[in-house]
Image: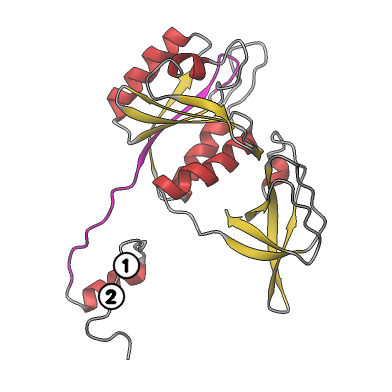
Amino acid sequence: SDIATGDELLASSHVVNERTVGVAAAQGITTLPVREPARVLICTGGDEIGDGDGAGTGAAMIRDANGPMLAALCMHHGMKVAGRVRTTDDPVAFGALLRSAIRQSNPTVVVTSGGISHGKFEVVRQLLSPLDGSWFGHVAQQPGGPQGTAVFEGTPVVCLPGNPVSTAVSFRLFVAPVLGVAEAESTAVLDAPVTGQEHKDCFHRAVRSVVDGRVLVRPVGGAGSHLLAQSVEADCLLRVPAGARPTPGDVVAVYPL
């Protein structure tokens, strides 16, 4: 009554859970072929950024929010943190630190946060953009426009923007679905006014609720990519396509967080 002879037991995309183990045991299966979790080397910093526990060394004395947040995102989406490395404002010194960290941690991928725009101290871009096959540019989304990719010391590098919300949104959209586990896009009914932009897809932090059997969604917090505290209650990203003007009652796309 549970499953018939010849039925597929576990799909190739299945994520192992406790019931998986029980089903396999019931079939006399003692081992399963699985994909090894991606090992991520997290790279954040700048001379003005601290280590998360204390202040930075520069004049701004900014604590590192993105490093601990990326580590938590990796674990949430089924990836392992292989190590952490800090950037500096010196591309040569940063290159030596990154090279050493890759050799020590042997990561599947490096994920960087910040240092990829056009400012004077954009060391990630300065180090990686001259490499063959690298790309740095803007995607038509808000938040998270600046993005980049490269291969350094034989290891793929995914370069995310540095504002905290931009980092988190970009990780969910571009890193988690490829290297980890992320819930599929779904839909919900818009329950509050929301704004978009003419030439960019907007990803609002939002919360869902169920009312009379319908899944409703409404944005929370401000739109600024630095407003991390205002995003903590969000359980999804609400997508407003470029040029769209949805109104309450419309069906919209949401990406579970």
Region in magenta: 29-50
Instruction: Answer whether labels 2 and 1 touch (C-beta < 8 Å).
Output: yes
Which quadrant of the figure contains the N terminus?
Answer: bottom left
Q: Position of residue 185 (x, y in %)?
A: 55, 59
Question: Is 34 drawn above or below residue 49 in the view shown?
Answer: below
Residue 121 or residue 231, whichever sits in front: 121
Residue 254 or residue 164, whichever sits in front: 254
In the visual, does 220 lie left or right of 129?
Answer: right
Q: Which mark is residue 153?
A: none
The answer to whether residue 132 is seen in the rendering is yes
What is the basis of the colouring in this image? secondary structure
Is residue 42 on the magenta stretch? yes
Q: Position of residue 21 (x, y in %)?
A: 28, 69
Q: Amino acid at mark 1?
A: Ala
Q: Which mark is residue 8?
A: 2
Is residue 167 on the magenta stretch? no
Q: Amino acid at mark 2?
A: Glu
Residue 140: quadrant of the picture = top right
Q: Position of residue 206 (x, y in %)?
A: 70, 54
> Which residue is labeled 1 in the image?
11
Question: Is 224 drawn above or below residue 151 in the view shown?
Answer: below
Residue at point 61%, 10% (across, down): 120
Give the spatial CA distance, label 2 vs label 1.
Answer: 7 Å
Residue at point 78%, 63% (across, down): 191
Residue extending farthest bottom: 1
State the SS at label 2. loop
Question: Is 174 drawn above or below residue 237 in the view shown?
Answer: above
Residue at point 67%, 53% (across, down): 238
State the SS at label 1. loop
The answer to whether residue 52 is seen in the rendering is no
